[in-house]
Image (cartoon, rainbow, N blue to C red):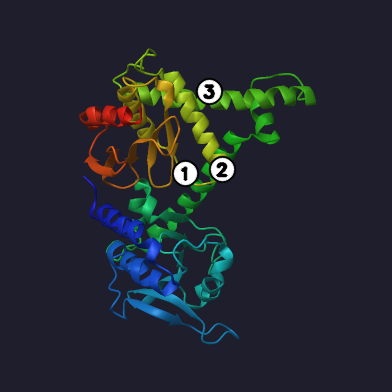
Amino acid sequence: MPTETAERIASLATKITQQRSSIETEEATKNAFVMPFISLILGYDVFNPSEVVPEFTADVGTKKGEKVDYAIVKDGDVQILIECKHIGAPLNIKHASQLFRYFAVANARIAVLTNGDEYQFFTDLDAPNKMDEKPFLVVQVSDMDSALVPELKKLSKDAFDLESIISAAEELKYVGELKRVLAAQFASPDIEWVKFLTTRVYEGQFTQKVRDQFSGLVAKATMQFLSDRVNDRLKAALGGQAPVSDNTSVSSSEASEHVAEASVENIERGDGIDTTLEEIEGFQIIRAIACSEVPPARIASRDTKSYFGVLLDDNNRRPIARLWFNTSQRYIGLFDSEKVETRHPIDSLDEIYKFADQIRETVHFYE
């Protein structure tokens, strides 16, 4: 069952999705999204100045009267500083100059830069009392990674423990950076990575010719490795049996290769989209259902930050279904003849089969 925190995040995510287009100022962003985040997700009373101080001021050297949008107080001390930007504004470390200046003066150990949807959390892992330039935790409320909900919970009023937060921050920061390095190597292996792997399987000298040869082999092996991993998950999801390649389904190897290629494409675009295996498994179920109406090759997928789309002929004007799996409650979105989407809650992938007739009917509309 979803935790209370996860449910509140899902509720706030819905609000952001529905209202963000009407929010035009930074002040409106704070009122509509940031204050509810502080209140509902972190659990602090935004109307109690002994807990949340808006427009927090602390003179810094020659800088007088500068303000940080919010300071969160716990046990009489400022623990968290929050700087806000307009909803949708890109967040960059250059936007955090006031946080840098206030960090040491206010003796806070946690600083937050947010645009009302994305939240970047900083501490001082690199040097004492100096805010790091890289966040240890990044969350996007409208596209929340469920694995990060417990980490967010640690920052809440009821669970706040500075020691455990700092300890977890170090692991979160470096695991996140290592994942980004591995993703970059999987997408486009550099010479050091190629040499590292080559010397473990090739005993000759690492010449330019060998380098050129193994650069392609490393990229190919990486792709096949990703395919094998996805294939294993698909088999497990289907009770140990890989899908059969015939007129009504697609082979697991073909599907997993498609997933691997899509994952690398997302990395290369740098768009932050993370295609999950659960989304791919859901796509495979929808594809198997829909290909009773059309050849399976015509059923395509496109992932976005908000949902995973299933399309006919890879055409956005021909949506078949959408998988809304980025919140604690999963939904499948289905379309009628007017292309109006209706979301249906599901608790497991097996429940997709309950909508088989409607999925086939949607495909039939376009034919």
Apparent side of residue 352 relative to residue 74 in the rendered image (left or right): left
Residue 345 visible, this angle: yes
At label 3, counting other C-alpha atoms closer than 10 Å, the crowd grade (few under 14, some 14-19, many 20 or more) is some
Q: CA distance from mark 1 to mark 2?
A: 9 Å
Q: State the image quarter where residue 287 is shown.
A: top left
Asked if the residue under mark 2 is in contact with the one under mark 1, i.e. CB atoms within 8 Å, the reply is yes
Residue 170, given in percent of the width and then of the height, sits at 48, 54
Which residue type carries mark 3?
Gln
Residue 191, given in percent of the width and then of the height, sits at 70, 34
In the image, which disc is placed on residue 284? none
Disc with the residue nearer the chain's start (2 vs 3): 3
* Mark 3, residue position: 224
Is residue 8 depicted above or below 47 in this figure? Answer: above
Is residue 53 depicted above or below 287 in this figure? Answer: below
* Residue drawn at (54%, 68%) of the image: 96
Which residue type carries mark 1?
Ile
Q: State the image quarter where residue 76 is shown.
A: bottom left
Helix, strand or loop under label 2? helix
* Mark 1, residue position: 273
- Near-viewer residue (93 or 251): 251
Q: CA distance from mark 3 to mark 1?
A: 21 Å
Q: Nearer the viewer, mark 2 or mark 3?
A: 2
Label count reads 3
Residue furthest right as drawn: 208
* Mark 2, residue position: 269
Q: CA distance from mark 2 to mark 3?
A: 21 Å
Is residue 30 depicted above or below 271 in this figure? Answer: below
Which residue type carries mark 2?
Arg
Q: State the image quarter where residue 256 is shown.
A: top left
